[in-house]
Image (cartoon, grey):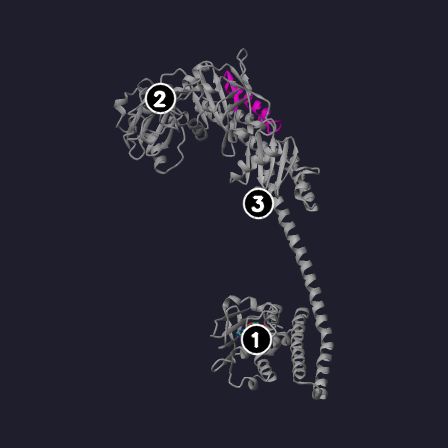
Amino acid sequence: MALNTISYSEKVNVTNCDREPIHIIARAQAHGVILVCNKNTFKITQGSDNIKDILGFELEEVLSDSLSKVIPAEQLQKLQQKVINNETLLPEEICLNNSRFLLIPHLSGENLIIDFEPFGESIDPLLFQEQLTKILSELGDSGSIEEMCQQAVSLVKYLFDYDRVMMYRFDEEWNGEVVAEVKETGMESWLGLHYPATDIPKPAREIFMKQGVRIISDVNYRPAAIQPELSPINNKPLDISGSELRGVSPIHIEYLQNMEVGASLTAAVILNGKLWGLLACHHNTPKFINYHKRQSCKFLTQVFSNKLALRTTSVFLKKLKKSEKVRKELVLQMNSMANISDALVKYKPRFTDLIDSTGGAVYRKGKLYLTGKTPSEEEVINLLLNFLNDRDEKIFQTKSLTKLYPEGDDFKDKASGILSIRIGQEKQDYLIWFRAEASESVSWGGNPEKNAYIKDGVEYLSPRKSFEIWTEKVSGVAKAWEAYDLEAAQNLQESITHVVVKKQKDEINELNKNLSEANAELETFSYSVSHDLRAPLRGIDGYARILLDNYAGKLDNYGQNALKTIMSSAEKMEELIEDILSYSKVGQTSRVQQVFSLETLVEEIIASQNLKSQFPGTTVKIENLPKITGDRRMIKQLMANLIENAFKYSSATENPRVIIGCKSEAEGNLYYVSDNGIGFDPKHKDKIFDVFSRIATEEYSGTGVGLAIAKRVVEKHEGSIWVETEPGRGSSFYFTLKEEEL
Ligand code: ADP
C-alpha cells in the first residue's frame, strides 16, 4: 500500500522512523485553525476541530459551505483573484471573532490550505528594520565556522529570547552535533553533544528543507484533528507539509517531553542545496512567536547560510591553493624522473603532502611503494585485490573502512580512513591515502542505540527517554575526508594521467626517431652495397662474354652451358641491383613537383619497354588519363611497374587485356591499372607490396621489388595503393595521390 493513499493514523506507529508520514498527519497545533477548501470552487472541504474555540464557527456548519462564510467578502475576493491568476499567496491580517489573526494561505494539489494564526504582538516596522540590519551587520563571515555559529545563536537568543538556542550540525550520516549554544544560567550545557540521525528523521529533514522555519508553541498541546481526515476532493490524505500549523509527530512530542522542552523553534541552515544544520531554540514553557518574527528568524538563517557558503568556499579555495602548489611540484618531479612512483613517494614533496593523511601507498606496474604510517605490504595488496579492485569508482573514500571491509579491523590504527584514486590504464594501479583511527570518544545526548525496538521483526520508533551524557569510544573511524581533499585527489589523478600519456608519447617519439635513423642508415648501406656490386658484376659478365666469344671452342658442352648460366645469373643480378637501387632512390630523394600528362607518360612507357612487340596479343586501353601534379620520374616508375606487371601476368590468358585509366571521385582522382590475367589469392593483398615478396611462380620472371617501389612512390605523394584481385580473373591496382596545386 502506498503511503499517500493511507491516512496518518493508520500508519503512525510505523516501523521505520525514516518513513513516518508526518506530511499527512491530519492534525493542527492548538494555537491556530487550519481550513481547507477546493481551490477551484472555494468550498470548504476540511477543517481543524478547534475552529469553534478559536474562530467561533461550528465545523459542521462551515464544511461544504463557501469560504465566504468565514472570510469577509472583500478579502475573499482578493484571495480568489490571486489563486485564479496563479500569483504568490501572501499572508494577510484578518479580524475574526473579535481577534486579530494572520491568514496564511498556500496550495497543496487541488486544495487551498489556510492557516489562521494568532496575530501576536505587532512589530513596529522601524524595529523590524532595525532587527534586519542587526542581523546583516552582526553576522560575520570571518573566524572559524564554530565562531560564526556562536555569533548566530547569540543573535537569535537576543532577538527571540528562547531559553536555549543551539546550532546543530549534521555529519554525513545525519547524526547531529551541537556546535554552538547560548542558554539561561542554571541549565545544563549540551554543547558538543551528539544526537543520532533517528532524532531528526528523513521526513522531518525534508520538510525543514521546504519550509525553513518550524514552530511548536506548546509541546504539551492538545492536537486539533482535521476533519474529515481524507480530502473529499480526491479521497486521499491531505499533504499539510506546507502549513505553519501542521501538528507534530506524537513521537517527536514525546521526545521533546522527555527532554523537558516546553516549546521549540527550528530553522534550517541550508548549504549548497543540502541541509547543513538546524538552528534549534528550546523554551522551558510554552512560547509563541508570530509569523513576522519567524520570518526574520528565517531571514537570519538565510543570511547565515550565505555567509557560511562564503566561508566554506574560502576555506575550500585556500586548501586547494595549498594543495595545488604541492601538485605542481609533484608534476615537475614526475616529469623529470624516469619512474613516476619514485617521484610520488621517494622525494619531497611526497603525494601524501597533498592531502592531510597519515600515510600512503602507490601501486603501479605490479610494484608497491609505501610511505608514512601504513598497513603492511601484504595487507595493502589484499586491500587492493579483495576490495578496491571490485569497486567501479575512479575515486573512492571512506572514513570507516572496517564497515565495508571487515579485514580492515587489523590495521584500523593505521588506516581507518582511505582515499584512493585509480592511476593509469591498468585496473589495479592505485594511489591511496590513509588516515589513522581518530582516537576520540563521542559524547552522545543519551545512548543512541536505544531509540528503536524490535517487535515481531518490525523496527518501532521509541523516542529516547534518557538524555544523560553517554560517551562512546569511537572505533575504526578516521577524520572524514573533505570536499577539498577529494578535489585535490582528483586533480592529482588528472595530472598523473597527463604525465603518463606525455611520457608514453615521448617514448614513442624517441623510438620512432631511432627507428627512422636506423632505417636511413640501412637505406644508405643497401644503396652503397648495391652500387658497389655493379662494377664486379660487370666484370663477371664481361669476362664470361670474352670466354664465350674467344674460347668457346676449347670448352665442352658442359663448360659452355655453365658459362651461359653465369651470364644469365649476372643479368638477373643486375636487374635485382637496379631494382634495389631504384627502391632506395625513391626512399631517399624528395619529390619534385611538376604538372604533366599522364597519358603521354603511359605511352612513353609502353613504347620504351617495347610492350606492344613483347606482348603482341594484348589489347591496351587508355581511359581518361588527365594531367597530373607530382614527381614525373617517380610516377613513371610507379606506372611502369604496374603496367609491366599487367602485361606480364596476363600474357598467358586468352585475349589478354590491359586497361589504364582514371576515375574522378569526390575525394579526388582514382587511378587504376587492370588486367584479365592470372590474379592471385586476395589474402596476399597487402604482402605483395613488401620488398622481395613474390607469389607468382618461376615461369614469370621478376624480382619482387616492383610493387614495393610503387608503394613508396604513392606514399611519397601522400596517397594510398591497393589491389582487387581474384585467382584466374585478373587484378586491378588502384592508387590515389595528393595532388597539390603548383
Ligand atoms: P615481380 O617482379 O615479381 O613482378 P612485384 O613487386 O611487381 O614483383 O609484384 C609482386 C608480386 O605480386 C608478383 O610476384 C606477383 O605474384 C604479384 N603481382 C603483381 N602484379 C600482378 C598482376 N597484375 N597480376 C597478378 N599478380 C601480380
List the residue tagged with mark 2: 456
The percent coordinates of residue 512 (x first, y second) are 66, 58
Would you place residue 578 above or below residue 179 in this image? below
Q: Tell me the quarter of the image containing the C terminus.
A: bottom right
Mark pair 2, 3: CA separation: 50 Å
Label 3 packing within 10 angstroms: few (<14), some (14-19), many (20+):
few
Residue closest to the eye, 639 or 593? 639
Q: Residues within 10 Å of mark 2 (few under 14, many from 20)?
A: few
Question: Is the C-beta of the residue carrying label 1 under 8 Å from the nearest atom of ligand 1?
Answer: no
Give the SS element for disc 3.
Answer: loop
**Mark 1 nearby-residue class (10 Å; few <14, some 14–19, many ≥20):** few
Which amino acid lies under the numbered mark 1 shown in the image of this protein?
Glu
| Extent of the magenta region | 139-168
* Residue shown at the point (68%, 55%) measured from the top left: 510
Residue bearing the label numbered 3 = 426
Classify the position of ligand 1 by quadrant: top left, top right, bottom left or bottom right.
bottom right
SS of the residue under disc 2: loop
Task: Work out whether 198 lies above or below 184.
Answer: below
Mark toward the start of the polypeptide (1 vs 2) = 2
Residue for point 59% across, 85% down:
610
| Marking on residue 202 | none
Say which quadrant the N terminus sits in: top left
What kind of residue is marked 2? Asp
Q: Which residue is mark 1?
A: 698
Callout count: 3
**Camera-nearest label, 2 or 3:** 3
Residue 705 location (% of width, % of height): 61, 72
Report x, y in % for residue 632: 63, 76
Mark-to-mark CA distance, 3 and 1:
51 Å
